[in-house]
Each structure stands twice: as C-alpha cells, then as structure tokens.
Amino acid sequence: MKLTRSKIILGLLYTCLLWFITVFLIVPNLNAALSVFWQNGSFTMRAIDRVFNSERAVNSLRNSFLLAPILSITVGFVGVSLVFITEYFRIRGSKILRHGYMTTLIYGGIILVSGYRFLYGHGGFFTNTLAAIFANFNTGWFEGFWAVLFVMTFATTGNHMIFLRSAMRAVDFQTIEAAKNLGANQLTILRRVVLPVLTPSLLAVTTFTFLTGLGATSAPLLVGGRNFQTISPMIISFSRMQGSRDLAVFMAMILGLASLALIGILAQLEKRGYYLSVSKVKTNIIKQKINNPVLNILIHIYAYGLFLIYVAPVIAVIIFSFTDAPTIATGQLRLSSFTLENYINVFTNMRSLRPVLVSLMFSFSAALGAAILVVTVCRIITKFKNKVSTFIEYTLMIPWLLPNMLIALGLITTYNMPRWFMLNRVLTGSIFIMILGYLIIRIPFTLRITRAAFFAIDDALEDAAKNLGAKTLYTFFRVILPIILPTMLAVFALNFNGLLTEFDMSVLLYHPLQLPLGVQIQNLTIADTATADNTAITFVYAVMMMVISGLVLYVVYGRGTKLAHEDT
C-alpha cells in the first residue's frame, strides 16, 4: 500500500487522538478506581467500610439520592410551564417574561446561589424585611433541604428554555386544529398532542436535571447548612485530606455508577419510540388563548410570580453592587448609599481582579481547545468511517458518563507523580491540568452539536470543490468551515459562559496562585468570611460575569441570528 501525504497526516491524527483519549480519559479514571481497591500492594475494601460506617458520608449519600428525583420533578414542572407560558399560551408580556426566565443563561452557578443567599439567607435583604415586620421571624429559615431545592429548581431550568422551546416548534398547528374540530378540550390537546412531541427532549433534560441533583455542590455548600450536605461537598472534604482521598474517589464512583444506570434507563425508554408522530408538512404554532377566565388570571399570576423569582436576585445584585458595605449589611437603601467604590476597588486591586482574569483565560483556552479538537474529530468520523474513528467517537463521550469530580480526582491521583507517557512531568497543581479538566468536561456537548452540523453538510459541495481542483485543506477552510462556523461559535459561547464560574472541577484542580472565580466566590461567601465587604466584591463579580456572558451571546447570536432562533 502506497503511503501518501494524506494517509501520513491521517495516521498522525489517529495517533494523537488515541494518545489523548488513553492518557486523559481512560487511564486517569481507571487509576482512580484502582486506588480505591488496591492499596499498599494488596486488595482492600477499606474505603467502602469507612464510607458506610461514617454517619456524615451515609447522610450525604441519602441526601443526594433524595434531592435528585425531587429536583427532577420540580424542575420539570417549572421548566415545562415556562415553555408553555412563553411559547404555547397567549400570555400578556410573554417577551418580557421570556427574557426574565432566560437570565440563568448569563447568571448561573455559584454566583446565582450567592444571589439567592443574599436575598433569602440569614441577614439577607428579604429576610431582614420580614424580620422587621414579624418580631419572632426565624432569620435562619432559608437553609437546609428546602432552600437547596428552591435555589436549584430555578437555577436549572435553562435546559428546558433551550431544548424544550426548540421541541415546541416541532408541534404541528394543523394537528392542534384537527383535535379542536374533533371536540378535544385544551387539557386533552396538551396531554395527547403537545406533550408527546416534547417527550424525547423532556426525557433528555430530566436526565440532565437528575445528574445535576446527584452532583449538586454550590447550593448545598452555601445554603444547605450543617443538616443538608450532599455527596459532592463530602468529596471535596475527603479529597483535601491525603489519608481520605480514596473515600472521595469511592463516593465519586457511586455518582458515576448512578449516572450510568440512569443513562441506560433513558436509552431503553428512547428505544421504545412510542412518541406521537406529526404531520410532515408542519405549520407554525399559533399561541392559544386560555378559554377559562379564572384559569387565565391564575396562570398570569403564576407567570409573573415566576418572573419575580427569576429577576429578583439579578436586580438585587446589580443594585447592591453600587452600594456601600453598611447598606449591604443592613439592606436599607438610601440615595447617599450609592457609590462606584466597589468597582474601583476590584478594578484597581489586582488581587481582586486576578480571579476574573484567570477564569477568562482558562475558559477561553478550554473552549477554544474543545472546539479545535472536536472539529478535527468530526471531520475524521464523517469522512473516514472505520473502527478506529468509531472508537474515538464513543470514547470521547466518557466525560458525559462520569461526574466532574471523579474526572478531577482521576487527573489528580494519576498525575501527582511523573509518568513516562507525559514525559515524566507532574501535572497536579499546574495551570495545564485546570485547562485540561475544563476542556475534558466540555467535549461531549461540543461533539454532539458539532457532529450534527457536519452531517448536515451536503457532500455535493465538497465533490464540486474537488472537481475544480481544490486541495483537501483548502476545501475544508473555504467550503466546510464557513458552513459549520455559526454552530461552532454558538457552542464556543455556551462553553465559555459555562466555564467562567465553574466550581465542581475548579475546587479540586486549582493552583493557590491561580485562583479561579468560582473558588474565589465560594471563599468570599462561606460563613466565616462572609462580611459586607466580601459580599460587595461578590456582587461586582456577578455583574461582570453577566456583562461578559451577555456580550458573548450577543456577538454570537445578535449578529445575523436571533437569540430566539432561539435555541439559546
């Protein structure tokens, strides 16, 4: 077989990709699992015994498996109602409501939790107001299971606003009209016509929600209190003690096994394929008027009540970011309280500004790296369909099956010593391992979206370029890349925004001299250091992240495509 330049390049790409998959996706996770059961040269069940004999550990496991299914129900109910309010029913001010419901796309993670804590937590603005009205009001009311459930319910409906809204556009209005003509009422139409079309997307986002509940970190840390801590905070505690790191890995493995089981159940449900098919020639849905006047009023009240819940933390954070520390501590707004001092302190103090710059650098590098890696992979798996490309495609989905903390612990336990396949370099504690961790956790999402964009390309375009004498690389950069570029920019924007305040992986991989923003916010908001000055800095960080995330989304979606094409 004659070796050509293209075959040599393809062989090198295969080699590099297989090396990446082996040393960063397979070896670390296997090594982490091995570290639990193989210690000091012999098999041991020590980690299992210690976990199940620890009351704190058992309680955290119970709490996670309690939170996950209940969260799936509450988020599902709220998320579906948001989509119906903005896309299906004729609700006054639905455009304004939509923007309020979508604030979680630019205001999420640990920043969002800290905003809810400021409003409703001990010493919070809303709590102080209630305490002033009711003499015996419990100022510590917003703590524990219900506080975590409340925060996470309204923090994790973003997937519903992205994916279910897209699925709603697949509903055929002719089918709805036909059901009306047959005498079906609105409830029957929702149950028998609309919901079946949404079911595949609803199953997918419910899976994401369940996994989010299992791996909850920020909300339990900040508002869970002592009585409601989940698995992830316990993993963080154990991972910081050298003698208990195997316990952290074992608990992360429990999360991973639960994730695999849930994904397997979802796959079986999808194989049944009993969803209602719709007309091949669809007509766009026309918003439906709620016929019952009482129900119409109640749904409007519900819609605007949700709107207040979503926008209240955002508005409060923006307003109080411009006030002095005494105002933040007391929650009493006066005209003389407003100042730019908080912003001046952050922008002129490198110690305060550094976490923002570090997170921007890490997020940009990881999002760009994921985009380049996945575009290369998608080009290979769509152009060359063989066993090697299939293996690469499926193994790159490993991070989707495992919790972020297990991936982080795998990297830590594997690369805290020199490895020959990494040129004997120690990665733990370096900047590279943080960027690598960020990149790894964004690969599955990037791959799924980019792969779909590649398969949508008409092969005739590339064949025409070849017939005109264009080289392979020239064809890719001048024909293929411009077609997939809008999708890649959208994925880059979502990855970049999602990583800006990433916490679960950051808290395990960060270097003390390169503190990322998520960890910095957690340090500022823990009970021992949560002063008014620290809260002011947190608010400035929150506003900065909202502005940056909003600008990124506008640059990607606001020029030529609307946010409401509106897959985001």
Image: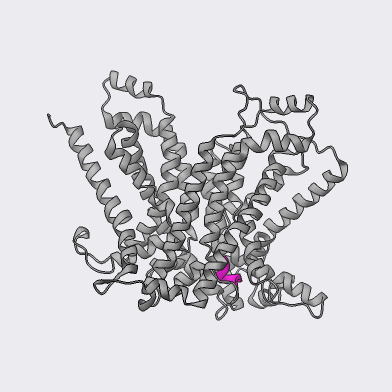
Q: Residue at x 44, y 29 (%)?
A: 456
Q: Colour scheme used in the picture?
A: one colour
* Relative vertical location of residue 218 with respect to residue 557 in this rendering, above or below: below
Q: Residue at x 57, y 68 (%)?
A: 220
Q: Specify the principal SS of the magenta part.
A: helix
Q: Specify the quadrant of the image occupied by residue 525.
A: bottom right
**Magenta run includes residue 153:** no
Closest to the observer, 500 or 381: 381
* Relative vertical location of residue 497 with respect to residue 178 in this rendering, above or below: below
* Relative vertical location of residue 445 with respect to residue 479 in this rendering, above or below: below
Across and down, in percent, residue 530 comes to 58, 77
Quadrant for the C terminus, please. Answer: top right
Q: Residue at x 45, y 66 (%)?
A: 355
Across and down, in percent, residue 333 comes to 73, 71
Quadrant for the N terminus, please. Answer: top left
* Relative vertical location of residue 434 with respect to residue 367 in this rendering, above or below: below
Closest to the observer, 522 or 353: 522
Q: How many marks?
A: 0
Left or right? Give the position of 471 relative to 247.
left
Across and down, in percent, residue 290 comes to 81, 38
Can see residue 345?
no
Residue at the right extreme of this rendering: 293
Across and down, in percent, residue 549 comes to 53, 53
Q: Specify the quadrant of the image occupied by residue 531.
A: bottom right
Can see residue 203?
yes
Q: Which residues are magenta?
A: 219-224
Q: Residue at x 60, y 28 (%)?
A: 277
Left or right? Give the position of 462 relative to 94.
left
